Image: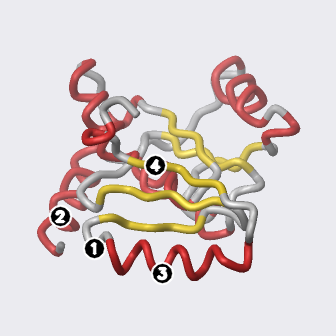
Amino acid sequence: MENFESATDVKVRLTNERALDEIVQSLADFFTSVDVVRTSPHDIVLTNQNTSKFDGLLYLVRQLGFSLSEVVAVGDGYEDAELIEKAGLGVAMSQAPKEVREKADWITRTNDMNGVAYMVKEVFRKQLRVNIKNENALMRERAESKQQC
């Protein structure tokens, strides 16, 4: 495995659902600097506690000279909730957990129903007006949450 030291997350799929809860707890106990999250009945994601998808998005936005308010973020899992909530337009797939959908500005169709394509068509082709969040408020929230850690 190349560059495993700099990996931000590792996804693991196990077929034994009954053992998964025990494995998640054991990993969390052993690797205290890693968040271990069960993302489906068979999947877990191990993530460095000092990073997130939102951190990656924020880095990319800054490198490219964009404003966070110009970004559309689409996701369907718990690990996507922060970037959906803080992007200029946060979009959740309709199969996303309720907690993720509640953070979204827009809920699109499922993956099986080409939800991303549908959202692009509806929002961009029709130039639908959407409320864009205030980037300064988001940056303050981010700084406050980092200070609390």
Q: Earlier in the sequence, mark 4 or mark 1?
A: 4
Whole-angstrom CA distance, mark 3 to mark 1, is 11 Å
Q: At which x and y percent is residue 114?
A: 81, 32
Residue found 58% across the figure and 68% down from its top: 38
Q: Answer whether labels 4 and 1 touch (C-beta < 8 Å).
A: no
Q: Determine the residue located farthest toward the right in the rendered image.
A: 113
Mark 2 element type: helix
Q: CB atoms at circles 1 and 2 under 8 Å apart?
A: no
Q: Residue furthest left?
A: 147
Provide the residue designation for mark 4. Answer: 10
Which residue is rendered at x = 33% and y = 39% of the image?
A: 4
Residue type for callout 2: Lys
On screen, residue 147 versus residue 85, left or right, reads left
**Quadrant location of residue 116?**
top right
- Of pointers 4 and 2, the one earlier in the residue sequence: 4
Sequence-first tag of 1 and 2 = 1
Instruction: Using the image, tell me which numbered label, if any, was put on residue 25.
Output: 3
Q: Secondary structure at mark 4?
A: strand
Q: Are the residues at dot 4 and dot 2 in contact (C-beta closer than 8 Å)?
A: no
Label 3 secondary element: helix
